Amino acid sequence: MIHEMNGRNDRVVTSQLAKKYGITRTVIVNALRKLVSAGLIQTRSAGVKGTQIEILNDIVYTEFDNKL
């Protein structure tokens, strides 16, 4: 998911990601929930337009950014 984002705050469409990577949408939603509960990201539903994701932790963002 993070690879699909442009910067620290972006919108992703979980159904499109699931189709692209050949996994279920449930897997993506559960992964997002785990990241939220760990305090690494914040999400907000945008309805059919997707899910707004904001990376909250600077260290995590830097690590993700370096690996992209």
Image (cartoon, rainbow, N blue to C red):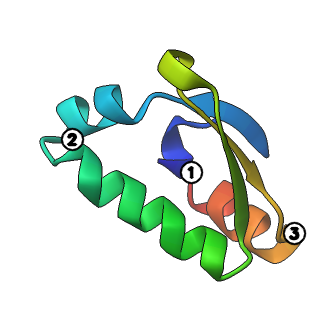
Instruction: Confirm whether residue 6 shows in the render.
Output: no
**Residue at position x 21%, y 41% from top?**
21
In the image, taking residue 23 as reference, residue 3 lies left or right, namely right
Residue type at mark 3? Answer: Asp
Asked whether the viewer can see residue 67, the reply is: yes
CA distance for labels 1 and 3: 15 Å
The residue that disc 1 covers is 68
- Which residue was labeled with disc 2? 21
Q: Quadrant of residue 45?
A: top right
Residue 30 percent coordinates (x, y):
38, 65
Q: Residue at x 53, y 26 (%)?
A: 50
Callout 2, which amino acid? Tyr
Q: Position of residue 6 (x, y in %)?
A: 69, 32
Judge the density around disc 3: few (<14), some (14-19), many (≥20) Cα neighbours within 10 Å. Answer: few
Q: Which residue is mark 3?
A: 58
Sequence order check, earlier mark of 1 and 3: 3
The residues tagged by marks 1 and 2 sit, at their Cα atoms, a distance apart of 17 Å
Q: Which of the two labelled residues, at mark 1 and mark 2, occupies the earlier sequence position?
A: 2
Q: Residue at x 75, y 62 (%)?
A: 61
Q: Amino acid at mark 1?
A: Leu
Q: Compared to 61, does 52 lie above or below?
A: above
Left or right position of 58 against 32: right
Q: How far from the left and from the top, in percent, is residue 47?
A: 55, 23
Can you name the residue that lies furthest to the bottom here?
38
Q: Nearer the viewer, residue 21 or 49?
A: 49
Counting other residues with Cα less than 10 Å from the Cα at mark 2, is it few (<14), some (14-19), or many (20 or more)? few
